[in-house]
Every structure is written in structure tokens, then in C-alpha cells.
Amino acid sequence: MRSEKKFDAVKMMREIRDKLSKEFENMNYEEQKRYIKERIKHET
């Protein structure tokens, strides 16, 4: 018997991927790498 999920990891991953796809649609590969590096820097 399955209990009700409190967190849906698949849904969250899809939302993150969709958001990044929209942000990256007008960026080339180098711009995408720079964007990711900057985001990682601010996270730590």
C-alpha cells in the first residue's frame, strides 16, 4: 500500500529542467557554462 507523497522528485526535476530550458534557449554553450558556474558560486 502506497502512502500519499509529500514530495514529488520527478515533478520537481521536470520543473527545474523546463525553467533552465527557457533560460538557456538564447544562450550558446559558453554562456550556459558561465551561467552555471556563477550559480554554483553563489550557492556555496
Image (tube, grey):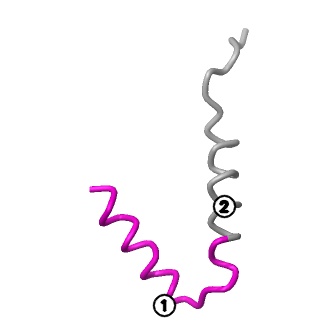
Left or right: 43, with 36 as reference point = left
In what quadrant of the picture does the N terminus appear?
Answer: top right
State whether residue 6 is above or below residue 18. above
Residue 12 lies, with reference to residue 31, above or below; the image says: above
Residue holding disc 1: 30
Give the spatial CA distance, label 2 vs label 1: 19 Å
SS of the residue at dot 2? helix
28 or 5: which is nearer to us? 28
* Quarter of the view holding residue 23: bottom right
The picture places residue 30, in percent across and down from the top left corner, at: 48, 90
Question: Which residue is located at x 30 percent, y 66 percent?
Answer: 41
The secondary structure making up most of the magenta span is: helix
Residue 35 spot, x, y in % from top left: 46, 76
The residue segment tinted magenta is 23-44
Q: Residue furthest left?
A: 44
Q: Give the class, few, some or many, for how many residues have Cα within 10 Å of label 1's Cα (few <14, many ≥20).
A: few
The structure residue drawn at horizontal position 71% and vertical position 60%, both measured from the top left corner, is 18
Which is more toward the observer, 13 or 38? 38
First reached walking from the N terminus: tag 2 or tag 1: 2
Question: Mark 1 is on which residue type?
Answer: Glu
Q: Which residue type does callout 2 highlight?
A: Lys
Q: List the residue tagged with mark 2.
A: 19
